[in-house]
Amino acid sequence: MVELIDKAGLAAELRAYLEEQVSLGCKWVVYDSDTPISSEFDLNCFADAAYAFVFEREHQQIFNWHQSVPISDMIYQLKELEKSGLMSDQKLNNPKTSFKTKAMNLNNLEDRKDEMRALGASEQSIAKMEELMKTGVPKFKVHQAMPANKGQVDVEFYLQQSSKSEYYFLNKFTVAHNLGKPLEQDQHYLIITPGEKGKSGSAKEFDLVTDAVEAFKKREGAVELAIGKDAAHKQQTLATMENGKVNFVAKSFRGTFYGKPAMQTMWPDRGKGFTVQQSAQMIQGYAVYRDDLVNFNSGEVYAAWVKFDMDKGAGANGNFNLQQYHDPQYGFDLPKVLDNYRIKELAVPEKREKLEADLRNGLTPLVSVEKDGQSVKLLLEAVPRYGKVNFYTPDGSLEKREQFMTKEAFANVLDAGQEKGKNKDKQQEAGMGIGG
């Protein structure tokens, strides 16, 4: 909860200032949560969450703890202060003037639900978030598993209470791609410790394979890493340890056990930004299309295909850099590119619309094409960097795209290849002449 100096009308004055900042495009505000706010000059407003977090970190001090919050949340708190007349000299631990009310918690809960749904979180994740918010725990994580073409993507949402109230904020979410076999319904990763003679053992449950492996490696003595509903219903042993040393890892699990999953931290802005689905596809190496990107310098909105630069590896902050492919520069017009191929779904407007939407979200939908006189199903991937699409069999084998082209498109490819060959011959002849 924000604290203000004892000045009549200050809450309304600050609210009006913040509403003006919103009209100018700002969405986040940073303030010193250890010092009562005295004027608008104590508030630093930003249009983008990333800049707010950078400012927060740069000005962070032990006794001047700067905090980033959405402007809309602070406006809400200021409105409540206007209603109640609550001032900085009225402490939060006073039950008569406490801002920690049930009504606020319910509003906060609805805000977070809307935000989670806007990001594409599952209803199970939202229900888990609600359950944990009602306990009043200061901070917590909610896990969600997403299907991947290989393995699965683990998503974790990070929620934390404000230092001054019970108001929760969704600070970030992470996506991590691991190649392990996805868990079935009601399954968990289990670290099983055998009991003494005549006594049953104990098991600790994990939903994330990375958490389970890390905890297993820290154990000593005899312990087992397995999959199952619980210790009594173990379905598969993944690894075992004796005397603190790993002595077995299942062959199918070795890549997951010894490898490190690709991971990225995403910073949503009140439910806006890359969705969970888009982020899950990007961490697998696919590109997604956004038409609401903003140039930080000019404030101009633009469109581009975006993917993580995974070839260069993660940077010092643990994240991959972004690669952007703008339509005019790379000449990747998705509808026109698709028209070059004999894909049956393109003939049905509703199916075509869904196909294009899936590709823009980085998905690899199944399409129907004809191969060797038979109709087959293949995975389709958008590759904006090269202005093309790729076709894969369901097991991941790459197919030659030319065999699915229309006659006109294939003829254009042949003509372009012949022209390229002629230009190369001319360059070689010119080089020989200069050398002579």
Image (cartoon, helix red, strand yellow):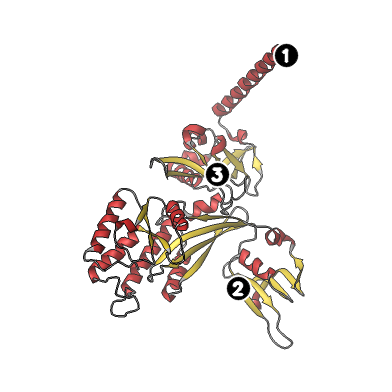
Q: Please name whichever residue, 302 or 316, is drawn nearer the observer in this view of the structure.
A: 316
Q: Quadrant of the C terminus?
A: top right
Rendered position, 185 above or below 354: below
Q: Secondary structure at mark 2?
A: strand
Image marks 2 and 3: residues in contact by CB distance under 8 Å? no
Residue 425 visible (yes or no): yes
Residue to which mark 3 is pinned:
367
- The residue that appears at 57% across and 33% down in the rendered structure is 405
Q: CA distance from mark 2 to mark 3?
A: 39 Å
Q: Position of residue 419 (x, y in %)?
A: 61, 20
* Mark identifier at residue 205: 2
Give the residue number, with chain letter if any, for mark 1: 435
- Residue 237 in the image: state x and y as whole percent: 71, 70
User: What amino acid is found at the position of numbered circle 2 in the picture?
Assistant: Glu
To which quarter of the image does residue 184 belong? bottom right
Please name the residue shown 60% across and 73% down the image: 205
Q: Amino acid at mark 1?
A: Gly
| Tally of marks | 3
Q: Report x, y in % for residue 42.
A: 34, 58
Secondary structure beneath disc 3? strand
Pair 3/1: label in front: 1
Q: Quadrant of residue 254?
A: bottom right
Earlier-in-chain disc, 2 versus 3: 2
Judge from the rendering whether residue 435 lies leftward or rightward of residue 34; answer left or right.
right
Residue 229 appearing in the image:
no
